Image (cartoon, rainbow, N blue to C red):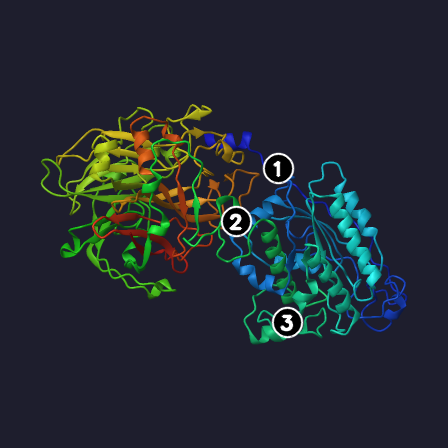
Amino acid sequence: MSRYSLFALICCVGIIVFAATIGCPPAPTGGDGDGNDTACGDQGAGCEGDGDCCDGLTCQDFSCEPATDGPDGDDDDGGDGGDDDGDDVEPPAEGLLVDHTSATAYDDIPAWAIEDAKANFNIFYGHTSHGSQLVTGMNMLDTGAGTLSIEENDGVDLGHEGDLGWVDTTRDVLDQAGSEINMVIWSWCAGVSDNTEAGINAYLEAMNGLEDEYPDIVFVYMTGHLDGSGPDGNLYVRNDQIRDYCNANDKILFDFADIESYDPDGNYYPDGSDWCEWCETWCDENTCPDLDCVNDSDCAHSVCFNCYQKGRAFWWMMARIAGWSGSADDVTPPDDGGGTDDGGTTDGGDSSAEGGVPAERLEPADLTYQGAFRLPEDFNWGALGMSFYPGGDSGTGSLLVTGFELLSDPAHPGETCWDPSWDCYASYGEVSIPTPAVEANWEDLPGATLVTPLTNFDGGLASSVHREYLFVSDLEYVPQQGSQTGDKLYGSINLWYAEGVAGADTFPTVWMANMDGSGAQGMFHVGPEGTSPYHGRKTGSYLFTAPEWYADEYLGGRTLITGRSRGTPGDTFEEISIDAGSQGPTFFAFHPWESDTSTGDLDALPVLYYRVSFPGCAGPNVGDPEECDYPDFTMCDDWTGGAFVDNGTQRAIMLVGYKGLGDNCYDEPPVECSDPCSASHGYHCQPYERQVIFYDVHELGHSALENQDPWIVVPYEVWRPDEFYLSDSPCYNAGGMTFDEDSGRIFIVERGLGAGEENAVVVHVWSL
């Protein structure tokens, strides 16, 4: 067992919480003597004899029996065992109507809102069989990792006229020592159909009284299910009474009946019953999901699509209560500033850095989207690195792009270099730049042409670091320097499992080659090897050029910049460390070589890095984001492309990457991370999103001049481009990034497109 695995086992044992289901007596047998009756009879001949248990209701096609288990067959449907952290939640200041439009809008819910609902709410839900439709519907939906904690009392509902026994049950639950319940929901069975104005008022007044008594608890009101009596029936009048009260008094209303009254196209069925007759017709004429559900068995008293719709509406309600605005454009958490017209831009973290020049800061609003184009299939599972080549494609300019993301032998395509006899190397190719287009389907985009086929450009040097556990991360075109005989290509790698391969030791990450890939030199360590803060874990993921004016002013003439985010400590386990990794992206500037043959370490200068607080910031299953220098750092953050972007008046250093938004979950037993993107062993931080972050170049310059600690500089802007095709919880990192200063074009790679394991690549283009 590795040292990190042992540490996780000792210090990070997960706590599993189960929500108890309050027991209830079985439904009494009816008076008709057949022994098969539910609490309202067997819904057939002889059910009139069950009048005692149903308070004199006439026999109808519904019953009031305690709910049976949902489709998974356990006793705690709805995902008991969530994050029972007992956090106080603030009930919404305004009311919320959850109706048939909410079910339709389920597809607009951002992943963060679902995750926040799971993390922050512990629900008590009192219901019988009809109320179980919500839980059944929730179980039909794939909402990613994690669960929503619901404690069910599935033997008691809101009863009938004036029945307030549920009020004392609510108090008993909320007054229990250590109760972490912060939301209460009660549903009806048939209790609205035969109710009176006074009886409904008693329900409304009791709910309002509980809200006054427990101001920190969210209470959800509900209408009763349809019974076929139509708009002239008592049910409609009583449901409208509930609606009017909730609307006038800013309550949260789950409109059970309304959801049953409309199909997904918005057609109204005023005379329907709880069976949802339109559901079967609609599904016959449209494509309904395969719900793995049996009508009237798994979905009590109804068809499965009815439960499905209620589950969608319920998750919409939870997302809204969690803080989502309800807009499809609102893709960011409220504490991150929400969505904007700039494609989801938010302010960066609070910075105490000096030297910034806000008037010169480049903003996403300064960028104009030009469209995108496809890369040839040669770059599937590649394009982690990209560089603009001014002299390429007969002088019109081209892109140099890294090939397969791992070292590879062309004789064994798509495989890691596990066989020592294979000839493994890093490759790159040159592609033309077609006129980009804006297309809804990436497959309709114009395609780039391969100008120079994939070429070995490291001479096998990178395999001297490791043959398998590294990525071919980036490359950069550099014009001829000093006594060199021609232009050069610099390449970089990142050792993705550095801790297992090199332990606490550092390693080189950069090499240099001629433009045709020959004459490779390296591998070079960025900065003096063995001297803090220089370490291989901090470099190699991205590589780009700084303009000469900036290099002269701040970097001692150094024009190349590399960096990486890898948040693991060295071997000392100090509380705070700068020796090995960085819990956030880094920038290390270095001089390019001036001769064709070079040896030694690169002459480097630290510009940006973040301290490692371990396990404080990002320890497995115990890390606290408040202890991180970089805002909301996770161990899954992966920044893959960078560029110094400057239009003469506005400028920024930009990075594109893949950002974890969840906790630093480490899947050491008994902890299970349930990451929908990966079942591999290690850290999981779902959900994920692509981000482009902007740094103030002058704040960074002051750090390079040692006027301030580098770790106090944070991005001033976080941008989530709407133009990415995979914008909703993607499972692939982004790719390379480069800037053509003459035309003012920014090129950003998007990987992960296509079906299955295709991992096709497009390049997005913006202009200044």
Residue 449 sits in quarter: bottom left
Q: Amino acid at mark 1?
A: Ile
Q: In the image, what residue occupies the spot 50% across and 54% down?
A: 330
Q: Residues within 10 Å of mark 3 (few under 14, many from 20)?
A: many
- Mark 1 or 2 closer to N-term? 1
SS for callout 3: helix
SS for callout 1: loop
Q: Which mark is residue 15?
A: 1
User: Mark 1 to mark 3: distance in Å?
Assistant: 41 Å
Q: Amino acid at mark 3?
A: Cys
Looking at the image, can residue 157 be seen?
Answer: no
Q: Which mark is residue 279?
A: 3
Q: Is residue 167 above or below residue 446?
A: above
Of tags 2 and 3, the one toward the viewer is 2
Query: Residue 559 location in percent, x, y?
Result: 22, 37
- Mark 1 or 3 closer to N-term? 1
Of tags 1 and 2, the one toward the viewer is 2
Q: In the image, what residue occupies the spot 35% across and 38% down?
A: 564
SS for callout 2: helix
- Mark 2 or 3 closer to N-term? 2
User: Mark 2 to mark 3: distance in Å?
Assistant: 31 Å
Query: Residue 558 location in percent, x, y?
Result: 22, 33
Looking at the image, can residue 38 be seen?
Answer: yes
Camera-side residue of 653 and 648: 648
Of tags 1 and 3, the one toward the viewer is 3
Q: Residues within 10 Å of mark 2 (few under 14, many from 20)?
A: many
Which residue is the site of mark 2? 112
Query: Residue 344 location in percent, x, y?
Result: 44, 51
Q: In the image, what residue occupies the spot 44% across and 49% down?
A: 689
Q: In the image, what residue occupies the spot 88% across and 70% down?
A: 48
Camera-side residue of 387 and 139: 387
Q: Amino acid at mark 2?
A: Trp
